[in-house]
Image (cartoon, helix red, strand yellow):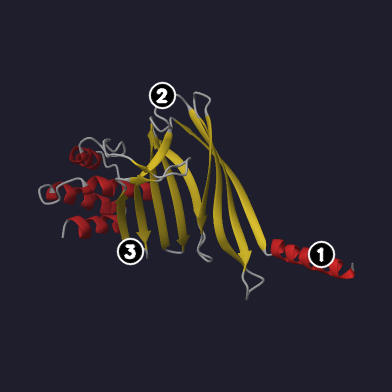
Amino acid sequence: MKKRLCCLCSMLIGVAIACHAQRTETSRQTIKGDFDNDRRGDRLSMVCKTHYEKGEEDSETWYFSRITVDGKIVLGNERTLHFTDTEPLDAVMGGTLNYFSPRSGVLLRVLRVSRGSTVVLTYDYYLYDVALQDWYRYKTATYDQATWKEVSVGFEYYDKARKPLVGTELQSLPVSHKDPMLPKNPLKYLIRETEKKHYPKSYYDFVSCIEVLNHIDKRRYRKEIKNFAKRLKSHDARWGNYIVSTYLK
């Protein structure tokens, strides 16, 4: 009997120590939009939790562990969907995980990791599929800022096995759609933005701008790109210099 009590006490002490070595911060967010492209209002409610753990050697310091998201989508037709998301974090840098809808039929997952001048943002674009009634990741954009002056932007496109937002099975979907995030005429869009003096104001704006440039013939329209870069440099030298080094050299 005493042996059993000792074992039970040891287990309880172990659980107490484990709980004491972990901490969670919770935040809530709700966004609205037309997520399934049916012209009816939809709502996405999220419970975001940032998990911390104490170091094995440094028991006085909390370190980032992971982020978890419990999402609830309520569509305009009263259909309700649930999904969970998790992302491991760098122990020191930490990060945030959010969602928003830049336009009808698209949900954007944004993971941001930053410390000092270092900023890395990963944008996962999910497009709604009417037949499958789910959102599937069709591209990922990454903004990587190593220092205040070193910036890079990359894109990855998924033509076959696409990850769903709500479900669990990958789907092989044909590339039959036009990217709703791209303007119909990238060159005209660039010229119009230059004339109106509209420049990227956020990391997301800059990433979107870079993808537009990727769909323009940089040799044929060097002059137009140069004019845009010149004006952008007066607004943000770092981003303007990136365009010059990437598209004009």
Q: Viewer-nearest of labels 3 and 2?
A: 2
Lower sequence index among marks 3 and 2: 2
Q: Tell me, yes or no, if residue 90 can be seen here.
A: yes
Q: Is residue 17 left or right of residue 168?
A: right
Q: Quadrant of residue 134?
A: top left
Question: Mark 3 = which residue?
Answer: 149
Q: Identify which residue is drawn at 46% across, 60% down.
A: 114
Q: Viewer-nearest of labels 2 and 1?
A: 1
Give me the C-alpha separation between circle 3 and circle 2: 42 Å
Give me the C-alpha separation between circle 2 and circle 1: 58 Å
Lower sequence index among marks 2 and 1: 1
Q: Identify which residue is drawn at 77% across, 65% down.
A: 11
In the rendered view, tell whether residue 230 sits above or below residue 197.
below
Find residue 8 and name its label.
Answer: 1
Of the pair 238 and 246, the residue shown nearer to us: 246
In the rendered view, tell whether residue 131 sits above or below residue 206.
above
Disc 2 element: loop
Lower sequence index among marks 3 and 1: 1
The quarter in which the C terminus is drawn is: bottom left
* x and y percentages locating residue 225 in the rendered image: 18, 49
Question: Mark 2 = which residue?
Answer: 39
Task: Report crowding for label 2: few under 14, some 14 to 19, many 20 or more residues within 10 A (C-alpha).
Answer: few
The quarter in which the N terminus is drawn is: bottom right
Give me the C-alpha separation between circle 3 and circle 1: 57 Å
* x and y percentages locating residue 83 in the rendered image: 52, 41
Q: Residue furthest left?
A: 220
